[in-house]
Amino acid sequence: MISILSGKGGVGKTVVAFNLAERLNAAGLRVLLVDCDFACGNSHILANVCPEYGLGNYLAGQLSLNEAVTAVGEDFDILTATGVGNQIDSGNVSAAAHLAEHLQRDSRDYDAVVFDHSSGICDAATVLAHASDVSILVVLPELMSISDSYGLYKYLTEKNSKIDCRLYVNRVRESGEAEYIRRKFCAMTERFLKRVPGYLGYLMESEAIRKSVAGQQPVRGIDPDSAALRQLTDVAQRLMGAVERGRQSRRPLIEASINNEPATADIKE
Ligand SMILES: Nc1ncnc2c1ncn2[C@@H]1O[C@H](COP(=O)(O)OP(=O)(O)O)[C@@H](O)[C@H]1O
Ligand SMILES: [Mg+2]
């Protein structure tokens, strides 16, 4: 389970989640993308599907996971935020724990589950990140994004000190810029939090990405020779270790136990 998070909105979470899911699928994995932007989910637009059913039906127990997902490609499905209503929102800890628990049980036919979260610090994303094997913090090379990401990193690590959180710098103009942001971010977290996030890499500011959004296609369908596609493929490769670890040790997460976890008990309060 892989969570894609950010402090600030519009940093490219959905673009990264969708294309990363596509790259993991291209590497031979069975992949499920879950739209956890419950109020403003838009991953179906990138995937160019018009789902009849989705997360709402799954949460309500009306449909099984298999029935609620929409196929994007072979072995690549999406669970859209369709029909969620008021069953879950970003502040609902027990609904998020319920979702995490049910997905852990029902998603065993998939090799990887990618969560595309809403922006900012919220309880649902924190619970799902807690259930994930790796959490990717998408940051832009700009001051506000760095400061919001620092806040989110602080929050996530305070709630769960064992979280595997990795920094991913999007929309960089040259590779040195990503390295600069990584060093700044890590210097700040080292100084004030006495820990540093892992580093997943970067994605350049890219015409191929812009065209892929406009064309509602993965980057591979727009420009298979683009630097953006190579960078996304590299990231998917770097995540293979976490995918393998997660597959081998699906951690049990039941609502009763999550309430006892110091990390999430805090949030519940
Ligand atoms: N690397 C990139 N190069 C060019 N444009 C990008 C890049 N990443 C994101 N974008 C643009 O930013 C917009 C917002 O991205 P999105 O994934 O919707 O952000 P979020 O999900 O974090 O709110 C996209 O529609 C796309 O046009
Ligand atoms: Mg989004």
Image (cartoon, helix red, strand yellow):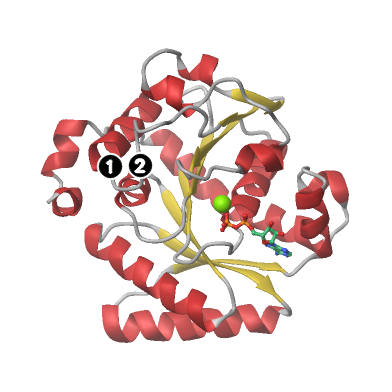
User: Nearest the camera: 234 or 215?
Assistant: 215
Labels in figure, total: 2
Report which residue position mark 2 lands on. 89
Figure check: 107 above or below 218: above
61 displayed left or right of 92:
right
Residue placed at 72% from the left, 69% from the top?
204
- Residue contact between numbered discs 2 and 1, judged by CB atoms under 8 Å: yes
Question: Extreme front residue here?
Answer: 85
What secondary structure is found at the residue carrying circle 1? loop
Figure check: 191 above or below 267: below
Question: Could you tell me how far apart the alpha carbons at marks 2 and 1 are, in whole angstroms?
Answer: 5 Å
Report which residue position mark 1 lands on. 92
Residue 260 image point, x, y percent:
11, 42
Residue 144 image point, x, y percent:
49, 79
- Inspect the image, locate mark 2, and give the three-letter code of the amino acid beneath it: Asp
* Ligand 1 sits in quadrant: bottom right
Residue placed at 73% from the left, 80% from the top?
174
User: Does residue 267 appear anywhere in the picture?
Assistant: yes
What secondary structure is found at the residue carrying circle 2? loop
User: Nearest the camera: 178 or 17?
Assistant: 17
Residue placed at 14% from the left, 32% from the top?
256
- Inspect the image, locate mark 1, and give the three-letter code of the amino acid beneath it: Asn
Residue 85 image point, x, y percent:
41, 31
Label 2 Cα crowd, 10 Å radius (few <14 / some 14-19 / many 20+): some
